Image (cartoon, helix red, strand yellow):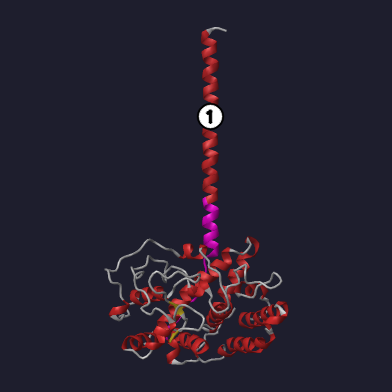
């Protein structure tokens, strides 16, 4: 074969290889863009926007949570439950760990301190960081949603936990603000101390602000539920949650917050009887859109809890709790008739 012809063939082969390489790169780049687009779309479709409450509505919501969790008793704001290795503080029973303590439940009281600091509440000096306040590594709501913890009825993790502040901002350096009590005995030995009274006063006078913090955490919880819902059902679950939150505001928000607080999100695989959960995810799935959202939510919640009791091991005797659970759900409907509620149901 002449050298010129051989050179032409080699040139054509190189041209084809370069063309194929470019096409492969372009296809790979397009695939990456498509994947990033799907991820972005998935995150966007999982976002939920809850209504903003007036100051009086947020205060009312804080009082309702305080009544359910603490029977409105001031001393309950600083408590340490038997069998637990940490105190539970405030209207949401936020967890606070001592230095170097590591538990399966995510610490949340420092996050509340961040929130109070960000909105201008003056904190006692012993609750402030020992080093200058600075933003830590960015911890967004998305990262919190991807780091779900195990949950149980008494410790809803998305509601209490998650390392994000109200708007997904970086957190000031409150990580070195540790619980000063080394044990439950130490805690109650100091229950009447000046420091403890200062803490109770802070928690008693910021119920509205704590409620706002809890609402921000609820957005993360529902966002996680939507993100883990199969794509064909995602829009419907999001619609139900947002519609309920708007309905008879703040009654719908109260229903969402209270249920997720005492029965969890329903995302934990370990919380199943006969393969069926009983958290907020299951209630939203069971709602009937032909009825008013608050009525539908209450009915679905009762149905979900009745199924839990039916599926529970007989030695747990969960039937004894069902009436109390149903009575608590009935308060959701009762709040819709209060003068302060806004009839915004569609």
Q: Which percent across, then down, holds residue 6?
A: 54, 12
Kindly identify which residue carries mark 1: 19
Report the span colored magenta: 36-55
Q: Which percent across, then down, holds residue 81?
A: 49, 84
Determine whether 281 is above or below 259 in the image: above
Q: Is residue 72 left or right of residue 123?
A: right
Determine whether 224 is above or below 66 in the image: above
Q: Which percent across, then down, holds residue 208?
A: 42, 84
Q: Is residue 141 left or right of residue 23?
A: left
Rendering quarter of residue 239: bottom right
Is residue 136 among the parts visible in the rendering? yes
Determine whether 211 is above or below 135 in the image: below
As drawn, the residue found furthest toward the top would be 2
Residue under the image location 53 percent in, 71 percent down: 221
Rendering quarter of residue 225: bottom right
Q: Nearer the viewer, residue 251 or 120?
A: 120
Marker count (numbered)? 1
Q: Quadrant of the C terminus?
A: bottom right
Q: Nearer the viewer, residue 207 or 83?
A: 83
Whether the magenta-drawn stretch holds residue 51 is answered as: yes
Mark 1 element type? helix
Q: Which percent across, then down, holds residue 71?
A: 50, 91
Whether the magenta-drawn stretch holds residue 179 is answered as: no
Q: Is residue 316 left or right of residue 238?
A: right
Q: Quadrant of the N terminus?
A: top right
């Amino acid at each position: 074969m002449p050298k010129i012809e051989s050179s032409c063939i080699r040139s054509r082969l190189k041209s084809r290889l370069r063309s194929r390489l470019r096409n492969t790169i372009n296809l790979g780049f397009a695939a990456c863009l498509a994947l990033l687009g799907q991820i972005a779309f998935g995150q966007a479709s999982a976002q939920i926007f809850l209504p903003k409450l007036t100051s009086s509505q947020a205060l009312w919501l804080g009082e309702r949570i305080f009544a359910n969790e603490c029977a409105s008793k001031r001393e309950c704001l600083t408590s340490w439950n038997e069998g637990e290795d940490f105190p539970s503080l405030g209207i949401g029973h936020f967890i606070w760990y001592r230095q170097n303590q590591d538990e399966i439940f995510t610490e949340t009281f420092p996050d509340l301190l961040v929130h109070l600091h960000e909105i201008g509440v003056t904190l006692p000096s012993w609750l402030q960081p020992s080093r200058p306040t600075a933003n830590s590594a960015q911890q967004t709501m998305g990262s919190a949603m991807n780091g779900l913890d195990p949950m149980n009825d008494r410790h809803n993790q998305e509601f209490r936990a998650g390392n994000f502040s109200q708007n997904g901002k970086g957190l000031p350096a409150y990580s070195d603000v540790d619980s000063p009590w080394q044990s439950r005995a130490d805690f109650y030995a100091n229950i009447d101390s000046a420091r403890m009274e200062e803490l109770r006063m802070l928690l008693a006078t910021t119920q509205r602000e704590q409620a706002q913090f809890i609402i921000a955490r609820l957005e993360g919880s529902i966002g996680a539920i939507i993100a883990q819902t199969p794509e064909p059902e995602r829009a419907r679950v999001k619609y139900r949650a947002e519609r309920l939150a708007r309905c008879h505001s703040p009654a719908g928000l109260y229903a969402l917050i209270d249920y997720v607080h005492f029965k969890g999100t329903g995302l934990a695989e370990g919380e199943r009887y006969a393969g069926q959960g009983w958290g907020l995810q299951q209630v939203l799935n069971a709602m009937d859109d032909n009825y008013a959202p608050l009525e539908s939510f209450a009915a679905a919640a009762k149905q979900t809890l009745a199924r839990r009791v039916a599926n529970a091991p007989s030695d747990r005797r969960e039937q004894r709790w069902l009436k109390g659970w149903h009575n608590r759900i009935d308060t959701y409907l009762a709040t819709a008739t209060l003068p302060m509620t806004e009839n915004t149901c569609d």
